[in-house]
Image (cartoon, rainbow, N blue to C red):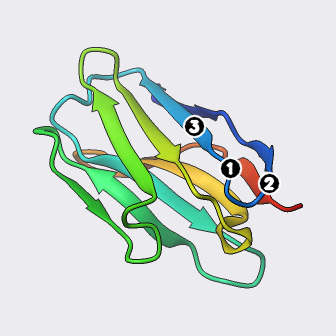
């Protein structure tokens, strides 16, 4: 059974940093694309960043230059380093793993950027 578990959310002041981590278990995902989405109440879930197995990363325009996604294929983990955080980054962040037949999601972790 596949499990996807996030950690690292919390409350941070504007301009601060947070690092989100995600661990996938139950299968091997070294060849799968992994990434992060976020969602605020009343809005659709939006892509933040994703990274393919070879390490190439793609970012939403709103986070380019501030967020960095990375992965460890041996550990089935993906991380999101978030710098220069803004209040508009406040959301529930979800880890996403593109499976061979279905996608897998974590339970979400709250990130709140507020003074």
Q: Position of residue 5 (x, y in %)?
A: 58, 31
Q: Is residue 69 left or right of residue 20?
A: left
- Say which quarter of the image contains residue 59: bottom left
Residue linked to disc 2? 13
Residue linked to disc 3? 19
Residue at position x 45%, y 67% from top?
Answer: 63
Q: CA distance from mark 1 to mark 2?
A: 5 Å
Q: Position of residue 8 (x, y in %)?
A: 67, 34
Q: CA distance from mark 3 to mark 1?
A: 11 Å
Label 3 neighbour load within 10 Å: few <14, some 14-19, many 20+? some
* Residue nearest the viewer, comparing 45 with 58: 58
In this rendering, the answer to whether 61 lies above or below 19 is: below
* Residue nearest the viewer, comparing 82 with 58: 82
**Residue furthest toward the left?**
54
Query: Is label 2 in a helix, a strand or a loop?
Result: loop
Label 1 neighbour load within 10 Å: few <14, some 14-19, many 20+? some
In this rendering, the answer to whether 49 lies above or below 86 is: above
Front of the two marks 3 and 1: 1
């Amino acid at each position: 059974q596949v499990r996807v578990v996030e950690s690292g959310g919390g409350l941070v002041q504007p301009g601060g940093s947070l690092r989100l981590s995600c661990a996938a278990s139950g299968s091997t995902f070294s060849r799968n694309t992994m990434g992060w989405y976020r969602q605020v109440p009343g809005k659709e879930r939006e892509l933040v960043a994703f990274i393919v197995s070879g390490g190439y990363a793609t970012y939403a325009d709103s986070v380019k230059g501030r967020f960095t996604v990375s992965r460890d294929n041996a550990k089935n983990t993906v991380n999101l380093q978030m710098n220069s955080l803004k209040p508009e980054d406040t959301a529930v962040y979800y880890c996403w793993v593109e499976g061979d037949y279905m996608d897998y999601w974590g339970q979400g972790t709250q990130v709140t950027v507020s003074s």
